[in-house]
Amino acid sequence: MGKEGASAAPTPNQRFDLFIGIDYSGARTASAPLKELQVYGARAGWTPEKWTRPQVAATRRTGNWSRVEVARLLLERAQAGERFIAGIDHCFSMPWAYFERYGLGSWPAFLDDFVTHWPTHEHDASVDGLRAAGLRSGTAKELRLAETWTSSAKSVFQFDMQGSVAKSSHAGIPWLKWLRDQAGDRLHVWPFDGWDPAPGKSVIAEMYPSMLKRRYPAAEGMSADQHDAFSIASWLADMAGRGALVDYLRMPPLTGTEQRVAACEGWVLGVR
């Protein structure tokens, strides 16, 4: 692992051994290697390093990650019993208006419905191709509650613009269902599986690298996508080292109505 960085040594009650930052991409298809899709990882107290995809046996070469390879990476780590927390740069759900519009009463019901209408996990499917079919959607003015608590969040329906998370979210959400189905109780999808993950469980959570990048400057030669993934992993390791990550995982100060909305919409780790 990399040289020791700014993160403090792990505390005695440290829940996680590994901190993973993923800058996501909704381009092309699920099996396509994407230079925008970046993964960084760090052990407690160390500076995050760029992870490269496993060698392809037939070519013995390494290259860019695909979405299916990232999903398999997280599943393998969870099944191995490794205590990790991974922050991913895409929305995990849709605004409350979407739930009301299509009669969806819970996040699991949303997942089942979403993969039916947006099967972006399938081999030859792409977000752009499915958008052309006029599938379930919303307006760019619709925001989730957590997004209204920030100054720069963009709507999950706001496609084709700089900094948009629409394509990556529509491409990534089906893989959340796949991971949840495959990993079972080894993996905790925060906060949908509860605000306070049980010790020993691996966790995946939605994060906004734009909130963090100024705190963790890019190294020389680091691309913008690499910096996003690096910033997520750095923040996770940093907050764990300070003993603050457990507090961030707890429910923010929400009213009863807001809690019911957040149970469907989810939340962004770090927004309080």
Image (cartoon, rainbow, N blue to C red):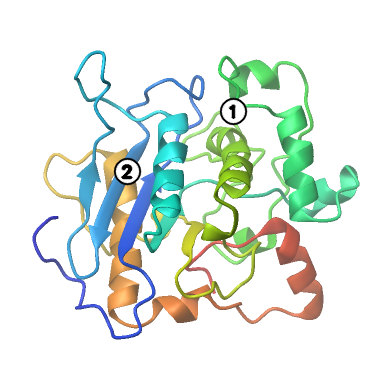
Percent position of residue 155, x then y: 63, 46
Q: Which residue is mark 2?
A: 39
The residue shown at (34%, 54%) is: 20
**Quarter of the image that includes the C terminus:** bottom right
> Looking at the image, which residue is at 61% across and 27% down?
120
Q: Earlier in the sequence, mark 1 or mark 2?
A: 2
Vertical placement of residue 263 versus 116, above or below: below
Q: Which is nearer the eye, 192 or 38? A: 192
From the top left corner, tell me how far across and down residue 119 is, in percent.
Answer: 67, 27
Residue type marked 2: Val
Image quadrant where residue 19 sits: bottom left
The CA distance from mark 1 to mark 2 is: 19 Å
**Helix, strand or loop under label 1:** loop
Q: Which residue corresponds to the image point at 80% horizontal and 46% vertical from the top-left?
A: 98
Q: Say left or right for 269 vs 70.
A: right
At label 1, the amino acid type is His
